[in-house]
């Protein structure tokens, strides 16, 4: 089973700042990595698939990069609605998720 | 509108059984890969099971032999039959469509295993 590690656990930033979230895999997942956003009381929402492709309707301020074992989700300028928990997920069976990074308001 | 709606959660005693249903609209279940994912406060998000469009099924080790995923093409509905339930199965269960990634999620249904 591939283990995903996310850092930092919590990121405290102000609106308008840039957020950089990291996800590291215990072995190569090629580019088969996705990012999700989850707000309290809601289901996760797909942001990025295959490491760098934005899902339908996702704003351009969200971008993903990386391959192999190291991946990054960048939010170029935080909007108030972006404060949430972000998870990465790899797509080799058995699918696994990272523990999440909480982006909260500084 | 593309949508997934789960039903069937509730309070169940350890050792009991429960069947979750997930009704899809706006797309065809049997033409897609469909998964169940659960979430607990302590363990975060955990993939549970997948059924591929061709019918193959796979399970997480934690539920193998106890849970069964299936679908009813005539009802466009996905199911998760859960048996020999344990306290650690307590979670919100989400039905998800897997199209490049988990792109469509239901609202989730809560399963509580407790005496």
Image (cartoon, grey):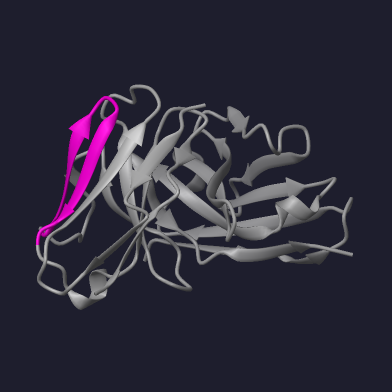
Q: Position of residue A29 (x, y in %)?
A: 34, 26
Residue A86 occupies which quadrant of the picture?
bottom left
B111 vs B92, left or right, is right
Q: Position of residue B38 (x, y in %)?
A: 58, 53
Which residue lies at the image location 85% right of the left edge and 45% below the top edge? B84
Which residue lies at the image location 40% right of the left edge and 53% below the top edge? A100
**Image vertical order of residue B33 relative to residue A93, above or below:** below
B100 vs A4, left or right, is left
Which residue lies at the image location 24% right of the left edge and 69% below the top edge? A82
B100 vs B98, left or right, is left
Q: Quadrant of the N terminus of chain B?
A: bottom left
Which residue lies at the image location 19% right of the left edge and 34% below the top edge? A66
Q: Position of residue B23 (x, y in %)?
A: 56, 60
Span colored in magenta: A61-76
**Image vertical order of residue A97 relative to residue B38, above or below:** above
The prevailing secondary structure element of the residues shown in magenta is strand
Q: Position of residue A85 (x, y in %)?
A: 37, 62
Residue B102 in sight from this viewpoint: yes
- Quick check: is A19 in the magenta stretch? no
**Image vertical order of residue B68 relative to residue B2, above or below:** above
Q: Quadrant of the C terminus of chain B?
A: bottom right
Looking at the rendered structure, the number of numbered marks drawn on it comes to 0
Residue nearest the observer in this picture, A55 or A28: A28
Residue B7 in sight from this viewpoint: no
A41 vs A102, left or right, is right
């Amino acid at each position: 089973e591939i283990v995903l590690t996310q850092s930092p656990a919590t990121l405290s930033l102000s609106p308008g700042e840039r957020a950089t979230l990291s996800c590291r895999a215990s072995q190569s997942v090629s580019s088969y990595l996705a990012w999700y956003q989850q707000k309290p009381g809601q289901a996760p929402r797909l942001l990025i698939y295959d490491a760098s492709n934005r899902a339908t309707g996702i704003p351009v301020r969200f971008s993903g990069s990386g391959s192999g074992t190291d991946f990054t989700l960048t939010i170029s300028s935080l909007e108030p609605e972006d404060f949430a928990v972000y998870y990465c997920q790899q797509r080799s069976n058995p699918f696994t998720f990272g523990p999440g990074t909480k982006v909260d308001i500084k | 509108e593309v949508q997934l709606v789960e039903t069937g959660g509730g309070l169940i005693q350890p050792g009991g059984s429960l069947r979750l249903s997930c009704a899809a609209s706006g797309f065809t279940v049997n033409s897609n890969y469909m998964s169940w994912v659960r979430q607990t406060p302590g363990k975060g998000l955990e993939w549970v099971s997948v059924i591929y469009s061709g019918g193959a099924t796979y399970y997480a080790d934690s539920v193998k032999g106890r849970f069964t995923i299936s679908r009813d093409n005539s009802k466009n509905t996905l199911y998760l039959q859960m048996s020999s339930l344990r306290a650690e199965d307590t979670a919100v269960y989400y039905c998800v469509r897997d199209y490049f990634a988990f792109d469509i999620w239901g609202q989730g249904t809560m399963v509580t295993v407790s005496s």
